[in-house]
Image: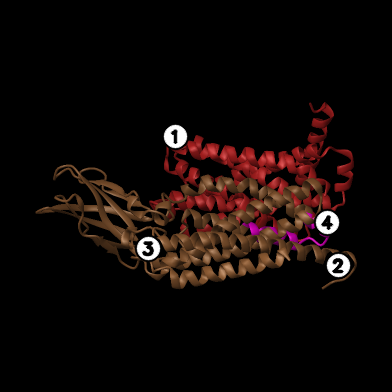
């Protein structure tokens, strides 16, 4: 009875989230409809890590107590982890293509999820290569734990692969506060913002406006853009769109006298609004996070039960 | 504390494996041939003059060096455990020698094999690809720590693979995600060593490598008995 209620509740809840995601939530100001994907993308990414954690915990419990149920839970969590990691990767790649101009660029979180998928794949490869079921569980649990020791290092190691990330928290919550790169006329003229290489080619003054000429390397092409800053109002004036992406380039800050000026070049999502700034979007996002978590637990226990029953049938000599 | 008999047992396991290895040279031959093949293949097109003139050669060479080391190591490192299972001597060893002594013995053998392999790969790269190592100390430190970390992660996996049925290809598949952090840092510090980076710039990388090595060895010591008795 309880299980049935839980099942229906989860189904209806997620159905409502799906409807709200497309009908109730307004399109993102700047990014447009692609902004909606955050409602699916973040929960699936989050559950991938949760699944990995549960898989390790239940593997450890299996090694300690030797109960088949614990291993069924560990295996079910790993299976769900793989499904959710694929969902997170696909939704993320779609968003990345539209907003950043490329499906894949070894952004730190992309690297992390790729490593997780490799681990899941290896875990299943190991399990399927062993005939004896007892040994299958035993060695599978040990591999899950070994992987669990190695993965935290990825979190420290991965930021070293690229200087910065396209996944800053500010992209999701509050873009206007994102840091840019500070370039100086007579000093440092090259730097990186996230994945973009930025070079300051020159600064000219036009009445109240200061116009910077910058060259930006984006997906292998150099674009020359001219964002400007209004000294009278102390605000960015011209904001330039980076071609083939939904990213805007602006001078966020200007310090110093002509001849020795420092400009902070920021590259933010078009519209310069965080993905979750809008209230309905935020609400639907949390509803989705909750709904997907319910879905995860329901699927997890269901799958573990199926594995249990399968095991009992096998012990009685019945194969299905 | 462990009794002297424990260390004798560990040493006996290592000595026996080294003797068998020197007699058959199965692992050594497989690894050496893999290393030579890789170096020659790279050298055909890129060396000895092509790559060293490229300004980005340090990064490319560091990656190629670790590709050669990693995949060659995958060819040979599982050998000592697979042999025990194939020759049905594992049970005898389980009955007579404490699990930890077996692990330490095999670890020593794997470390020695890796040291030989790394020396060979480095010499091949020096000769065939005209590599100049700007910071020899840093290069040696990276290779030693990298070797220690690789042995720590792979010795226990070798035990695991020996118990599974698809022994050959499975080892690489299982090892790659686990040693990914190690490979990323090792490539980075190797690049620094080749291009003349300072110890200070490589410091945090080496620290991470050391932390990873310790974590992998602790996890392996903790889990080995369970794998071995499985």
Q: Is residue A251 left or right of residue B184?
A: left
Q: Which chain is red?
A: B
- State the CA–CA distance, disc 1 to disc 4: 50 Å
- State the CA–CA distance, disc 2 to disc 1: 61 Å
Chain A image colour: brown
Residue named by callout 4: A134
First-in-chain label (2 vs 3): 3
Circles 1 and 4, Cβ within 8 Å, touching? The answer is no
Above-or-below relation of A57 to A81 = above
Instruction: Please indicate, yes or no, whether residue B52 appears anywhere in the rendered image.
Output: yes
Residue named by callout 2: A313
Residue named by callout 3: A219
Residue A42 % position (x, y): 51, 59
Label 1 SS:
helix
Q: Chain of mark 1?
A: B
Q: Chain of mark 2?
A: A
| Callouts 1 and 4 in the same chain | no
Residue named by callout 1: B200
First-in-chain label (4 vs 3): 4
| Callouts 2 and 3 in the same chain | yes
- State the CA–CA distance, disc 2 to disc 3: 55 Å
- State the CA–CA distance, disc 4 to disc 2: 15 Å
Q: Chain of mark 4?
A: A
- State the CA–CA distance, disc 4 to disc 3: 50 Å
In magenta segment, residue A135: yes
């Amino acid at each position: 009875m309880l299980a049935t209620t839980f099942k229906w509740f989860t189904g209806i809840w997620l159905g409502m989230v799906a409807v709200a995601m497309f009908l109730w939530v307004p399109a993102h100001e700047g990014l447009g409809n692609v902004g909606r994907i955050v409602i699916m993308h973040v929960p699936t990414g989050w559950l991938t890590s949760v699944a990995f954690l549960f898989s390790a915990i239940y593997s450890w419990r299996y090694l300690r107590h030797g109960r088949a149920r614990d291993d069924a839970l560990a295996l079910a969590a790993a299976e769900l982890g793989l499904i959710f990691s694929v969902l997170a990767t696909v939704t993320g790649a779609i968003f990345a293509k539209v907003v950043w101009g490329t499906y894949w660029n070894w952004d730190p979180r992309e690297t992390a999820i790729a490593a997780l998928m490799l681990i899941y794949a290896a875990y299943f490869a190991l399990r399927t290569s062993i005939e004896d079921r007892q040994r299958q569980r035993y060695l599978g649990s040990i591999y899950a734990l070994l992987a669990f020791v190695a993965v935290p290092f990825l979190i420290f190691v991965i930021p070293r692969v690229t200087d910065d990330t396209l996944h800053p928290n500010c992209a999701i919550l509050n873009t206007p506060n994102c840091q840019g790169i500070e370039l100086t006329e007579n000093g440092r003229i090259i730097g990186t913002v996230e994945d973009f290489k930025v070079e300051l080619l020159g600064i000219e003054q036009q009445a109240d406006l200061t116009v910077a000429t910058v060259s930006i390397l984006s997906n292998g092409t150099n674009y020359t853009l001219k964002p400007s800053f209004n000294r009278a109002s102390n605000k960015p004036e011209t904001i330039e769109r980076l071609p083939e992406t939904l990213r805007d380039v602006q001078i966020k800050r200007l310090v110093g006298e002509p001849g020795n000026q420092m400009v902070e070049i920021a590259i933010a999502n078009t519209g310069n609004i965080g993905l979750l700034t809008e209230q309905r979007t935020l609400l639907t996002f949390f509803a989705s996070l909750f709904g997907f978590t319910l879905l995860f637990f329901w699927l997890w226990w269901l799958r573990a039960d199926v594995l249990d029953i399968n095991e009992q049938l096998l012990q009685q000599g019945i194969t299905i | 504390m462990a009794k002297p008999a424990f260390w004798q047992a560990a040493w006996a396991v290592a000595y026996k494996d080294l003797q068998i290895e020197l007699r058959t040279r199965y692992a050594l031959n497989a690894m050496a041939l893999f290393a030579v093949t890789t170096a020659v293949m790279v050298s055909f097109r890129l060396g000895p003059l092509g790559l060293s003139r490229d300004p980005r050669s340090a990064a490319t060479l560091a990656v190629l060096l670790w590709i050669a080391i990693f995949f060659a190591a995958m060819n040979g490192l599982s050998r000592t455990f697979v042999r025990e299972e194939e020759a049905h001597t594992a049970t005898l060893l389980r009955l007579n020698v404490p699990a930890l002594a077996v692990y330490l013995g095999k670890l020593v053998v794997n470390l020695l094999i890796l040291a030989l392999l790394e020396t060979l790969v480095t010499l091949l790269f020096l000769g065939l690809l005209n590599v100049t190592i700007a910071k020899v100390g840093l290069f040696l430190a990276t290779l030693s720590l990298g070797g220690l970390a690789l042995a720590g992660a792979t010795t226990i996996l070798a035990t695991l693979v020996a118990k599974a049925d698809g022994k050959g290809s499975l080892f690489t598949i299982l090892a790659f995600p686990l040693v990914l952090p190690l490979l990323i840092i090792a490539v980075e510090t190797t690049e620094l060593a080749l291009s003349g980076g300072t110890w200070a710039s490589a410091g945090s990388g080496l620290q991470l490598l050391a932390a990873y090595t310790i974590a992998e060895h602790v996890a392996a010591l903790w889990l080995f008995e369970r794998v071995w008795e499985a």
